[in-house]
C-alpha cells in the first residue's frame, strides 16, 4: 500500500527537494564533518580537534562549513565558560536524521568502487 502523501508529491517537488538537500549537505566537507562529529559524539569536539580529524580542511573552510551546518540546525555550537573560552561542536538530534541517507551513500559508493574495479 502506497503512502497517500507520497502520491501527492509532483516530479518538480521531488527534484526541488533533491536540489535543496544537496544545497544543505553538498560539497566536499559537510558530510565529512558531520560523520566526524557523530563518530566522536561522546567527546569534546573543539574546532582544532575537528580540523585534525577531517584531513585536509583549512581553518577558513571549516569555519564556514560549521557555520552553515549550524544555520541548518545540523550542528550545535556551545561556548564553554573556561579561560580561554572553549567552543564545542556537536551533532544535533536533527543532524542525526541525515545518517540513514549517508549510510546509503556509503553502501552505494563501496558497491560502485567494486563495479569500477571489475571493469578495469
Image: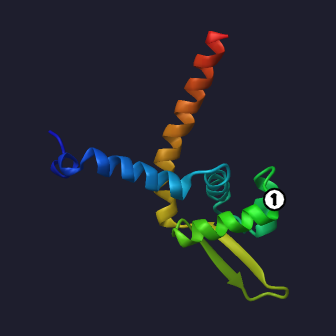
Tell me the quarter of the picture where residue 74 sits: bottom right
Tell me the quarter of the picture where residue 71 sits: bottom right
Above or below residue 74? Residue 9 is above
x and y, in percent, of residue 57 in the image: 78, 55
From the image, which quarter does the N terminus lie in? top left
x and y, in percent, of residue 106 in the image: 57, 37
Relative side of 55 to 65, left or right: right
Above or below residue 21? Residue 80 is below
Nearer to the camera, 11 or 91: 11
Residue bearing the label numbered 1: 58
Relative side of 85 to 6, left or right: right
Which residue is at a point 17% across and 41% down the rendered structure image?
2
Nearer to the camera, 69 or 41: 69
x and y, in percent, of residue 76 in the image: 59, 72
Which residue is at a point 81% across and 59% down the rendered structure image?
58
Which residue is at a point 67% across and 10% down the rendered structure image?
120
Nearer to the camera, 28 or 75: 28
Amino acid at each position: 500500500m502506497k503512502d497517500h502523501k507520497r502520491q501527492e508529491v509532483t516530479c518538480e517537488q521531488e527534484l526541488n527537494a533533491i536540489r535543496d538537500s544537496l544545497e544543505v549537505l553538498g560539497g566536499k566537507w559537510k558530510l565529512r564533518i558531520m560523520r566526524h562529529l557523530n563518530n566522536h559524539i561522546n567527546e569534546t569536539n573543539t574546532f582544532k580537534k575537528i580540523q585534525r580529524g577531517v584531513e585536509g580542511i583549512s581553518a577558513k573552510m571549516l569555519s564556514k562549513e560549521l557555520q552553515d551546518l549550524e544555520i541548518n540546525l545540523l550542528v550545535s555550537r556551545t561556548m564553554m565558560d573556561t579561560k580561554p573560552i572553549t567552543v564545542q561542536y556537536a551533532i544535533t538530534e536533527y543532524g542525526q536524521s541525515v545518517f540513514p541517507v549517508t549510510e546509503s551513500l556509503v553502501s552505494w559508493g563501496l558497491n560502485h568502487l567494486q563495479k569500477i574495479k571489475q571493469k578495469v
